[in-house]
Amino acid sequence: MTISGRITAASRSYWLERDLHPGAWWLWALGLAAAASRTTNPVLLLMLLGVACTVVFARRGNAPWAAAFRLYLWLALAIVVLRVAFRLVFGGGEGETILISAPGIPLPSWAAGVSLFGPVSAEALLGGLYDGLRLATMVVCIGAANALANPKRMLKAMPGALYETGTVVVVAMSVFPQLAESVLRVRAARRLRGDAGSGLRALRAVVVPVLEDALERSLRLAAAMDSRGYGRSGEASAAGRRLTGVLTIGGLVGVCVGIYATLDGSSPRYLAGPLLAVAVAVAATGFVLSGRRVRCTRYRPDRWRTAELVAAGSGLTTLVLMWASTSDPLAMNPPVSVLAWPSVPMVPAIAVLIGALPAVLTPHPAIEAGVPAPVEPAPTSRAAESPQAVG
Amino acid sequence: MINLDRVTVTYPDAARPTLRDVDLTIAEGELVLVSGRTGVGKSTLLGLLNGLVPHFTGGHLQGTVRIDGIDTRHRAPRELAHLVGVVGQDPLAGFVTDIVEDELAYGMEQLGTPPDTMRTRVEETLDLLGIAGLRRRPLQSLSGGQQQRVAIGSVLTAHPRVLVLDEPTSALDPTAAEEVLAAVTRLVHDLGVTVVMAEHRMERVVQYADGMLLLPGDGRVLHGTPAELLVTAVSVPPVVRLGRLAGWTPLPLSVRDARRLAAPLRARLADAPAPYRGLPPHGAPVLVAERITVRYGRVVAVREVSLRLHAGQVTALMGRNGSGKSSLLWAVQGSGARAAGTVEVAGVDPHDVPGRQARRLVGLVPQTAADLLYLETVRAECEAADRESGARPGETRALLERIATGIDPDQHPRDLSEGQRLALALAVQLAAAPRVLLLDEPTRGLDYEAKAAFGAVLHELTARGHSVVLATHDVELVAEVADRVVVMAEGEVVADGPVAHVLSGSTAFAPQVSRVLGAGGWLTVGDVERALSAVAT
């Protein structure tokens, strides 16, 4: 095979439609979210929002969780609106440009420090807007990860040590819809008995059957899981379990502290880099040790290939470049005291645009045969569905 | 393959053992049907086979249970997962994952099967059970028959030698039940899996069974071929009762066997008067529903259905799962969703009046009758029902006593048998004396005797002028009790007429007697019996 032939073959297999490893999308999204946390520049934040949306619309599949992205957008909008509304309600008088001079409501002395209403300045509103926009961008980034990667597949990609925890989480996630369905059913049955009552008795009339139902269901599920071999692999000694527990939990706590210190510029530096590194190592040891006794295998595990590197890499590059560009602090966090259109710094802007690369540089998701699209298909396409899908 | 040696199981607080001194051996590759009334220990017997009894349920086990030579006494059920596959009654309750393919792989992941083996086994199982088109579908979105086949597939991938099925077709319509049973028999024939199956609707299964375990109720287990045991058994499918009546030997187990023996009987019945099937509806209808439409989002569950119900009539509502039967019942009762249409009972639309008044017009017993009950004792439940419906004190208790005698009033409703719980729910709803009574799948999990008792209750209700609607998959029950059948498909009424007319003309809904005797409108053994005695005199 010629070299050009090989390249063609490789690129064909690269572009073959498939779902990327959920971890890749999560790394990409977390990179963008962390990048957003570094700036309050509204232009950069809006660019990040745009980048996240572009990638989602270009690369999401037709599964139900992909359709949930809209909810995250609404949530983001609500966050911005709330942030600004808070400044209106709890007073936003710091600043020179007073827009509304509403009278304040005096509060008793125990509520000192909190004011209700009062004059509202443009600077305060702008501060609320920038803050809200930053949080909203981070929320949309997480939403993007959820839309692009099946959250349950993410659990499957967890290290062996977390396998059983993952199963528990999946089961718990299926319990809530069941509980809701159970409540609706029992309430409908109450109406059949003509009992529109209210108060404690009515509550009990719903809660008791629902709980009995849930208990019965969980017993049946436990029996089914036991019959199918759940928990069959490996018993560890008490001491071994304790050691892995301490390592894992301790490591994870360290990671949390380390990440906080890294994000919060005012924490001591030794808490940031070094602690984070040590904590990751400790947690990893714990995972490896406890993963060793798990003898479960994985069905069709997601594989990590070049496209995953591209997706995760672009998000992380955005983060690193954003991090490194400390040259112009005023552009990254434009002061609200100056009512001027913020300038757009060059390097961070390019960094953000790099985050959009997965929209074109990763393969399309596989179209799942038989899964109904989130949007109801047009009546004409019904005939094309497989007979099983209709049955 | 399966060997029980002097097995006795006693649950704590039980007066006597559930199973006593059971000795039995089941050979490899047999399909064995477990039969007996509700509460005689069928589930206990099935649970013994993978150690759920006593490891999971508690209780005291004497004797030994050996599966493929392995004693279950010291093995938890999970240690037997590679050997015994268990599928429960409600497949949805046993699903661990949410996608068909993952569910099939779950058991193998637990066993540590190598990934490439898993891949091939999942593909093979998808084909074996005819569910390859569903591989990426969410489990919740499947129909009942599909879910049951996925549940069977999910234990099959571990390549168990024994498959235990508890009431695999009880919730399914006749066609879906056929799908599941066809899959099971293919497993027995092609893979040599030993199958142990409990099923109340014996008429669906008995023809496929090699052996039968009959639990008479005193702790014993009788083991034999179906032909031997059914000669004397109390609960038997209609075709066997017909065989007994006509004196056929050997006793036919399937419609096909019976049909070959039926020519003389058909000739005798040719001169007999046509079966009597009640009077055609007369007088003004008690309930008039016009152009009822129910929609959930963009899905139309019921499409412009009109229905007239007459006093003293039992109407059966049939149709496959998801054809809109339940939605129609709830909409007619008034408390369910209704997008368009009107209902009129005694000049009032039950949708427009408060629940208390609506239930005096139309009563509904929902599919899970236990939802109606929430108190600790039967007595408290009855007293609450008296208060709610404004009946005189003691009315509900009296009703309950008439429907099912001898229920201990201090028992917890959850501890009642399925039939008793249905009776209690029925009594609670009847306390308000509704003119129309709607029942959604009332006979799920009832054995033949409980169904016969239920039929008698329906008869009494119609004699007192109630109009009853029964949504059900149970063809034999409809043949026994209904006067009129309404068949629904995709939210529309596709057939509506007298029971003999609709059932005997249908391929899916024809009862066994009608299949054996062909045209003539014979639906039940009772019909034939009356006709024969008329001919004899």
Image (tube, grey):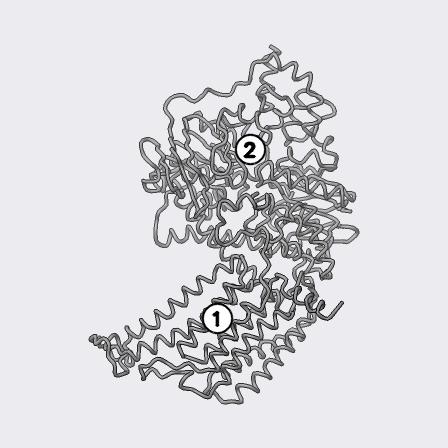
- Quadrant for the N terminus of chain A, please: bottom right
The residue positioned 65% from the left and 78% from the top of the image is A285
Q: Up-down: is B114 above or below B352?
A: below
Where is residue B466? Give x, y as percent: 41, 29
Q: Which label belongs to residue B451? A: 2
Where is residue A365? Give x, y as percent: 58, 61
Q: Nearer the viewer, mark 2 or mark 1?
A: 1
Q: Up-down: is A186 above or below B108?
A: above
Where is residue A76? Give x, y as percent: 41, 68
Q: In this view, does A312 lie to the left or right of B251?
A: left
Q: In which quarter of the image is residue B249?
A: top right
Q: Which amino acid does label 1 sit on?
A: Val
Q: Which label belongs to residue A51? A: 1
Residue nearest the observer in this picture, A125 or A258: A125
- Chain containing mark 2: B
The residue positioned 44% from the left and 82% from the top of the image is A345
Where is residue B463? Give x, y as percent: 44, 25
Classify mark 1: helix, strand or loop: helix
Q: Up-down: is A61 above or below A134?
A: above
